[in-house]
Image: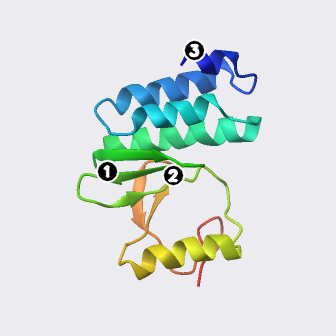
Amino acid sequence: MRAMTRNPWYSLRRIDHVRDGARAAAGVTGRDAVVALAANAASEDQAHFIAEAMQMLVRFQTTAEPLDTVTARGTVTARTRRGAVVVPAPVDYVAWTQRVAEFARRFRSQGFRAECVADGADVLPCPARAHGGRLEGP
């Protein structure tokens, strides 16, 4: 956590989000790697994204299902105790690019079911195609 205080992209509020997320993830494998990723954020946007992703995971864990592991490879992802993959995406919209389409295709081809987190709390099935701020895909 000290490293974040030296990172110019972190406000005290963002540091609190990451700290609260790390505390809530006590016992979750990979927690320290997420904190390290956060501490090394290279831009204000990345710092904001990671801090908000941590908050989404905290809300998911407390309202939907306990997490087993979190990973930090470029972004933050998690796996629940029953094996579901959680990809927090604190964004207002997602541009459906080739890279995003490939990501979704890989998960669907492996039999994963997509769920959407609305307002960081409610877990809902993701529609295959949706408009108005929700995920749209093939």
Q: Residue at x 52, y 50 (%)?
A: 119
Q: Residues within 10 Å of mark 1 (few under 14, many from 20)?
A: some
Q: Specify whether 97 is left or right of 113.
A: right
Residue for badge 3: 2
Q: The disc labelled 1 sits on which kind of residue?
A: Ala
* In the image, residue 46 above or below residue 135: above
Residue for badge 1: 64
* In the image, residue 19 above or below residue 106: above
Q: Measuring from the top left, give residue 2's x and y in whole percent.
A: 57, 14
**Mark 3 or mark 1: which comes first in sequence?**
3
Q: The disc labelled 3 sits on which kind of residue?
A: Arg
Q: The disc labelled 2 sits on which kind of residue?
A: Pro
**Front position in the image: 133 or 53:** 53
Nearest to the eye among marks 3 and 1: give it: 3
Q: Residues within 10 Å of mark 2 (few under 14, many from 20)?
A: many
Residue pushed farthest bottom?
138
- For the residues labelled 3 and 1, the Cα–Cα distance comes to 31 Å
Residue for badge 2: 88
Q: Specify whether 138 is left or right of 68.
A: right
Nearest to the eye among marks 2 and 3: give it: 3
SS at circle 2: loop
* In the image, residue 64 above or below residue 105: above
**Mark 2 or mark 3: which comes first in sequence?**
3
Q: Residue at x 69, y 41 (%)?
A: 46
Question: Where's the C terminus, which quadrant?
Answer: bottom right
